[in-house]
Amino acid sequence: MKSWWLVADIGGTNARFWALAPGTDQPFWACQYLVEDCPDFLTVITHTLAELADSTKAVGPPERACFAVACPTDIERMVFTNSHWNFSAAELESALPGCSVEIINDFAAVAHAIPALNPADTLQLGGGSELQNKAKVVLGAGTGLGVAALIPDSGRYLILESEGGHADYAPIGDLQIEVKRILRSQFNRVCIERVLSGPGLVNVCRALGSIQQRTVKFTTPAEIVAAAIADQDELALETLDFFCNVAGAVAGNLALTFAAKGGVYIAGGVLPRFSAVLSNSGFRSAFEDKGRFRGYLSDIPCYLVTKTDIGLFGASRYLTVDNKPHV
C-alpha cells in the first residue's frame, strides 16, 4: 500500500493506533500499548511504524495523521495531564516526515464521532428526543474526565475542546460535602476529575470507607466495579452509586451551560463498564435536580455511548469528513 493514514487515541492509561486506507474510517491494522510500559511517546511512534511495516504492506510514514491526546493542544508542548509523556508538534512531525499531522484533544475526537453514531451505538438514559440544530455535550470518565461540546453551524457541528474536567467539584448534600472535605485534605484543590474518573472511583471509595470507619480492600477501579457488579461488597456498591450521582449532576450542569437540547453523551472507559448499574442509579434524578430548571432538563436525552474505540473512530472522522473547508 503506497498511501495510508494513521490515527491515534492517546490517554493516560492506553495508547491506541489505527492504520487506515485513505478516506476510510475503519482500520486495516490496529495496535495498543500501556502508557506506563513505555518510557516516552516518540519511541512508541517508531515502534508502531516498525510493527506496521512488518505486518502489512504499508511502508514508510503515513500521508496524513490525527493524534487525539489527553491534554491541552493549543500550546507548544503537549504535556499529558495524567501520564509522564510529553512531545511537541515539531518532534512528532520529525518522526513522521512528509506526513500532514493534526493534533486534537481526545474528547474533541469523541465529539467528532457523535454525529455518525447509530442507535445501536448508544443506550438512552431518560429524557425525550434530541432536538435538531441544538448543541450537544459529550463527557466521559477514564484516567481523567474529558468534556467537549458540539455547536451547530450551518448544517454541521463546530467542536469546542474543553478542560471542563478540571473545573471545581461542587458537592451536593452532606455526604458529598464530607467526601470533598476528605479529598481536599489529600489534594488541596478538588476538581471534578478527582471524583469522576477511574482514579476518582478509588478516591471516593477510600473517602467513604474513612467516613464509615470501614476497611477499604480495593486498590484499583476495576476491583471496585467487579465487586459491585457481582454484588459482593456493600462499599463498592455505595461507591458506584455515589459516582453515578456525581456523573448525573455534572452532566446536568453541562447541559445547562451549553443549552444542550441536542443531547448529552456519556463516553469514556469507566461508565460503560457498569451500564446496568448506571441505568438504575440516581444518575437521571441528579441530572434533572436543578431547582427551577428541572423542567428545562427533563426532556433533554442522555445517552451512554457503547461503541468501542470511539476516540479512534472520531479521529478518523476528523480526517475523512470534518477537517474540510467550511463552504
Image (spheres, grey):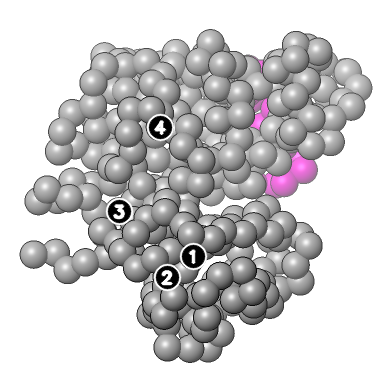
First reached walking from the N terminus: tag 2 or tag 3: 2
Q: Position of residue 31 (x, y in %)?
A: 62, 59
Q: Main secondary structure of the magenta part?
A: helix
Q: Which residues are magenta?
A: 174-189
Tell me the amino acid under the disc marked 1.
Ala
Residue at 50% in and 75% down: 58
Q: Which mark is residue 159?
A: 3
How busy is the neighbourhood of tag 3: few (under 14 within 10 Å), some, or many (20 plus)?
Answer: many
- Contact, CB < 8 Å: mark 3 with mark 4? no
Q: Earlier in the sequence, mark 2 or mark 1?
A: 2
Callout 2 touching callout 1 (CB < 8 Å): yes
Whole-angstrom CA distance, mark 3 to mark 1, is: 24 Å
Q: CA distance from mark 3 to mark 4?
A: 20 Å
Quadrant (top left, top right, bottom left, bottom right) of the N terminus? bottom left
Q: Quadrant of the C terminus?
A: bottom left
Where is residue 37, by image quadrant?
bottom right
Name which residue lies at 35% across and 68% down: 22
Kindly identify which numbered label has been placed on residue 5.
Answer: 2
Q: Say if residue 252 shows up in the picture.
A: no
Tags 2 and 3 touching, CB below 8 Å: no
Name the residue carrying label 1. Answer: 19
For marks 3 and 4, the one nearer the N-term is 4
